[in-house]
Image (cartoon, grey):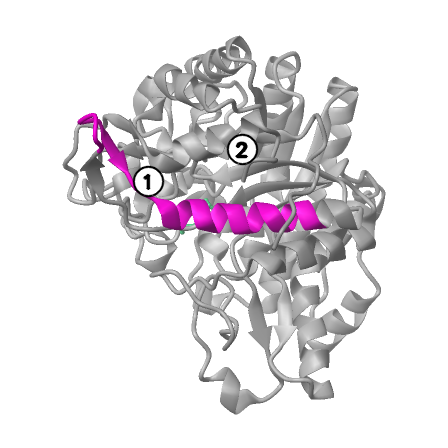
Amino acid sequence: LCVMKEFPADFLWGGAIAANQSEGAYNADGKGLSIQDVMPKGFSGPITEEPTPDNMKLVGIDFYHRYKEDIKLLAEMGFKAFRISIAWSRIFPNGDETEPNELGLQFYDRVFDECKKNGIEPIVTISHYETPLYLSKMYDGWLNRKLIDFFIRYVETIFTRYKDKVKYWLTFNEINSILYEPFCSGGIYTDKDKLTKQDLYQAIHHELVASAMAVKLGHEIMPNAKIGCMILAVPIYPLSSKPDDVIATMQKQREIVFFADVHARGEYPAYMRRFFKEHNIEIKMEPEDREILTHTVDFISLSYYMSLCETADSAQKSNSKGNILGGIANPFLEANEWGWQIDPQGLRYMLNELYDRYKLPLFIVENGVGARDVLVEDENGQKTVLDDYRIDYLRDHLLQVGEALEDGVEVMGYTAWGCIDLVSASTAELRKRYGFIYVDRHDDGSGTLERYKKKSFYWYKRVIESNGKSL
Ligand code: BG6
């Protein structure tokens, strides 16, 4: 039996979305193309030359035109925080211009003003898998050091513009995902199979420097702002108690925490020296890079969906079940329809590990379960979704957040992923839904885009109202 633990009084309850998965209006008001506009199958399928009508992101859920109605619904649930991203290509359509697109800037002014009107704190991701396509094609994305300059121009523009409207900023969404999805995450146009580890870690270095520069600049422009990194957090468990498996697990976990280590400690960790040596990697650094990296983050934010296992046994490795990181499935856990294994305790474990390591506040900015929803009529004839499976998933995870709080971990907030249904990142489907709010839009392009409150909407409202006491 679980007794609910106390959540801090100022806990930032809310939800999260990303521009490319929700806004639609892919070419409105001077927006340039982003890499997402040529990814009709998400990162699990091929990219196209031009945007094609089967790409669900071109319309998204039309948040671009419906943000007022949507923010009102979030406010009705009692949201304290709403995580969105700014579409880089709305502000700099190609990415390498010297002047920003005023109409793009005005859109986010309207969104932030609407949040404020509704008492909601915006949490803003600067780069969420939406590098301008031009920067990807012409420069090969983050493989090219020039991206740092383009990024910083964009960052300076949005910091200066929104300094009085936005206090919480995240630099790169799931920065470590570049290792697995270099196009989606790092805008690297070169084929994944042609990229060497040297290439990837060079691109990573550019992002790490850019992220630290953003932290430095942010603190100068907005002394009260809190700027964090964002990590795809996946706890890795040894598949067996064999010491070889334990060491393999340590290495696999370092592949992930390396990114948080640099952001939080301001330098490359010692273990990377060996890793670079053994893989013949030589990172090209400029003399100023070391100093730049010392500008460390104010907090660590993370997404959490699943845990994975690791083994040193290559025969077992080849049996592994794939998901975003390509690890090994845990025989003790169940998975959702897309093979993502559900492990609420992994969240408590991860929060403790990260807090022990850095003593920095943590912010869970993504968590949730993708599921097919069925729209039904309730007893009053209102359309709704009876999504008890979603409530169960979120409750189980929030109970573990409570445990972590009790363990002494500082958790700033929790923003449920896809609080309103949106287009999936990995598969670009709409049928993989996460929301408390159902959006009538389907993978064949049909649907009215009407919004309906699911059963979880009322549940989450009570959770927030009671500050986590009523789970
Ligand atoms: C994270 C991303 O990887 O997981 C989100 O930051 C994404 O953009 C989320 O939507 C869930 O993944 P998916 O593939 O189910 O949309």
Residue 208 in the image: state x and y as whole percent. 69, 47
Neighbor class of circle 2 (other Cα within 10 Å; few <14, some 14-19, many 20+) is some
Q: Position of residue 204 (x, y in %)?
A: 64, 53
Is residue 331 rendered to the left or right of residue 429? Answer: right
In this view, the residue in front, 206 or 97, is: 206
Q: Residue at horizontal 38%, vertical 19%?
A: 67
Q: Can residue 198 be seen at all in this image of the molecule?
A: yes
Amino acid carrying label 2: it is Val
Give the position of the N terminus as an image quadrant. Answer: bottom right
State which quadrant residue 213 falls in. Answer: top right
How far is the residue under mark 1 from the one under mark 2?
36 Å
| Residue 174 included in the magenta stretch of the image | no
- Which residue has dot 2 on it? 463
Q: Residue drawn at (56%, 64%), measured in percent from left and top?
A: 307
Q: Could you classify mark 1 by the number of other residues whose Cα lies within 10 Å: few (under 14), some (14-19), or many (20 or more)?
A: many
Looking at the rendering, the stretch of residues picked out in magenta corresponds to: 378-403
Left or right, 60 with reference to 187: left
Badge 1 is on which residue? 37
Observer-nearest of 400 and 235: 400
Q: Is residue 76 left or right of residue 438?
A: right
Main SS of the magenta part reads: helix
Label 1 vs 2, first from the N-terminus: 1
Say if residue 286 shows up in the picture: no
Q: Position of residue 294 (x, y in %)?
A: 84, 42
Identify which residue, 417 or 348, lies in the foreground: 348
Q: Is residue 103 above or below residue 401?
A: above
